[in-house]
Image (spheres, helix red, strand yellow):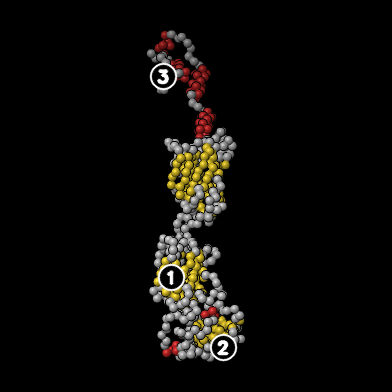
């Protein structure tokens, strides 16, 4: 059986295998057979080469060319694109955009204008909420149709009807359930009384539709945020730099000022208010009356209730006040042995407008019931008239005005040489000097000092032109007054 055709290793007898078998049979013929019978002449070298070439071509034809493979891959990718694209044609290219919506309230009871929201079937759209100062405004709740849109991964397949879920911070994520969508979304922010309405739509026949990818809603509402706090409840008082000041109040004589004295307050700031007489002697408080919940006196804030709260002074001349809300409040103070009551009004300080009061020194005309123990040095000091300037003798009602650097109307500033930080005024035929120094000579007619003793005021009537003084370190110097 030496002349039987051979099968190639592939095991599949085809045209190529047949030609190969013919060549092998021809080239490997047994000499004995050729001697017995010569049926056909052996192929020439040219015929053998032709058969080999045909065999090679047929074998190569069983494989795809690179061009054919590329064409098949292109068809597969085109099929993937046609299945994945959202739109009417493979050329639909949506253009995601980011934008800001500014809303201003028209007053309580007036609804906000509905706002448009454009979605796309393959885009997650975020909607974030802020106040007009850029502080995050948390979401209380929101309502929508779960069959049409998904909000915060809730909605679309397997859900029916109207859904309402708690908010997640100040951000919502929204996606449509179908290519064509038309519905509304209602959002209520914390502390607000009017919901925000969004007209939600998705779907377009345009080749490059504009789609909302990130929307920031900035709301300027007449609903006040918690006093001194951001919308997320964080205390915001980095702008606060409390100041100290001195005021003069006469509850009986209101010819010059008939208005209630304002006290500027701010969140996180405790204001101390002290009372004294014209000689800077402390004046004890008999009683304080204030509205609880709006302002706190010598204690923590309470729940706001109707009416007033009365607090005994307990022989102290100072009380400590903290604001509990962004409302104004009046505080009534009655001093021991003093006719009439003092009225103070707390006014919230505003950033970039004014600073809160940290320390208030209130001078009240009259004599404090507190008596000061005199020493030999204070009784024998020059110009003190045996210490009569202390305690029960109010020698000059204008001394406090000059001491605070607020001279009365009509005072004329004096030119002073030789002193550091010394000020002077001529008023009503007398000379008033103010500064951190002690007079050595000549003797003065009246004087006063600040509560800490660092500032002094001296009166000379009639005025003098030369004074020998001593600073707080004991060094003498001369003042020349023109």
Identify which residue, 136 or 383, lies in the foreground.
383
Q: Which mark is residue 288?
A: 1
- Residue hosting label 3: 7
Image location of residue 459, percent across then percent down: 54, 86
Location of residue 168 with respect to 300 vertically, above or below? above
Helix, strand or loop for disc 1: strand
Residues packed near mark 1 inside 10 Å, few (<14), some (14 to 19) or many (20 plus): many
Q: Depth check: give the residue in front, 250 or 169.
A: 250
Position above or below: 426 against 255: below
Examine the rendered structure and indicate whether residue 105 appears above or below residue 122.
below
Q: Residues within 10 Å of mark 2 (few under 14, many from 20)?
A: some
- Residue at left 54%, top 35%? 87
Q: Which residue is mark 2?
A: 461
Residue at screen point 49% across, 52% down:
192
Residue 109 rendering spot, x and y as whole percentages: 53, 51
Q: Nearer the viewer, mark 2 or mark 3?
A: 2
Q: Between marks 2 and 1, how big is the CA–CA gap?
A: 41 Å
Q: Is residue 32 left or right of residue 239?
A: left
Q: Earlier in the sequence, mark 3 or mark 1?
A: 3
């Amino acid at each position: 059986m030496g002349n039987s055709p051979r099968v190639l290793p592939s095991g599949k007898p085809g045209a190529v295998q047949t030609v190969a078998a013919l060549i092998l049979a021809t080239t490997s013929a047994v000499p004995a057979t050729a001697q017995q019978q010569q049926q056909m002449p052996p192929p020439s070298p040219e015929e053998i080469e032709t058969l080999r070439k045909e065999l090679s071509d047929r074998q190569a034809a069983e494989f795809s060319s690179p061009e054919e493979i590329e064409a098949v891959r292109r068809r597969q990718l085109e099929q993937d694109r046609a299945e994945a694209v959202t739109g009417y044609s493979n050329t639909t290219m949506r253009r995601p955009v980011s934008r800001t919506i500014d809303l201003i309230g028209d007053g309580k009871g007036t609804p906000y204008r509905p706002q448009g929201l454009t979605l796309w079937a393959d885009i997650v759209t975020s909607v974030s909420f802020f106040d007009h100062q850029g502080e995050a405004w948390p979401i209380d709740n929101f309502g929508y149709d779960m069959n049409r849109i998904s909000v915060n991964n809730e909605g679309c397949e397997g859900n029916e009807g109207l859904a309402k879920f708690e908010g997640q911070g100040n951000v919502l994520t929204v996606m449509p359930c179908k290519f064509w969508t038309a519905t509304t979304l209602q959002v209520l922010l914390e502390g607000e009384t009017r919901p925000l309405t969004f007209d939600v739509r998705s779907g377009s026949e345009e080749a490059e539709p504009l789609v909302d990818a990130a929307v920031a809603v900035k709301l300027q509402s007449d609903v006040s945020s918690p006093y001194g706090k951001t919308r997320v409840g964080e205390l915001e008082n980095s702008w606060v730099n409390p100041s100290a000041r001195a005021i003069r109040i006469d509850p009986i004589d209101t010819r010059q000022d008939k208005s209630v004295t304002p006290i500027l307050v701010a969140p996180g700031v405790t204001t101390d208010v002290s009372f004294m007489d014209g000689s800077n002697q402390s004046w004890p408080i008999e009683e304080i009356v204030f509205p609880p919940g709006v302002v706190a006196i010598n204690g923590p804030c309470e729940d706001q209730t109707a009416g007033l709260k009365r607090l005994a002074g307990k022989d102290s001349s100072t009380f400590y006040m903290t604001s509990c809300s962004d409302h104004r409040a009046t505080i009534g103070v009655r001093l021991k042995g003093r006719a009439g009551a003092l009225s103070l009004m707390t006014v919230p300080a505003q950033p970039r407008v004014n600073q809160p009061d940290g320390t208030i020194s209130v001078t009240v005309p009259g004599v404090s019931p507190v008596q000061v123990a005199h020493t030999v040095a204070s009784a024998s000091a020059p110009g003190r008239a045996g210490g009569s300037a202390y305690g029960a003798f109010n020698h000059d009602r204008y001394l406090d005005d000059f001491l605070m650097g607020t001279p009365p109307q009509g005072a004329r500033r004096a030119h002073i040489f030789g002193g550091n930080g010394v000020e002077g005024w001529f008023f009503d035929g007398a000379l008033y000097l103010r500064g951190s120094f002690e007079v050595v000579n000549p003797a003065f007619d009246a004087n006063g000092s600040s509560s800490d003793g660092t500032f002094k005021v001296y009166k000379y009537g009639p005025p003098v032109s030369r004074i020998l003084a001593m600073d707080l370190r004991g060094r003498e110097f001369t003042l020349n007054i023109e």
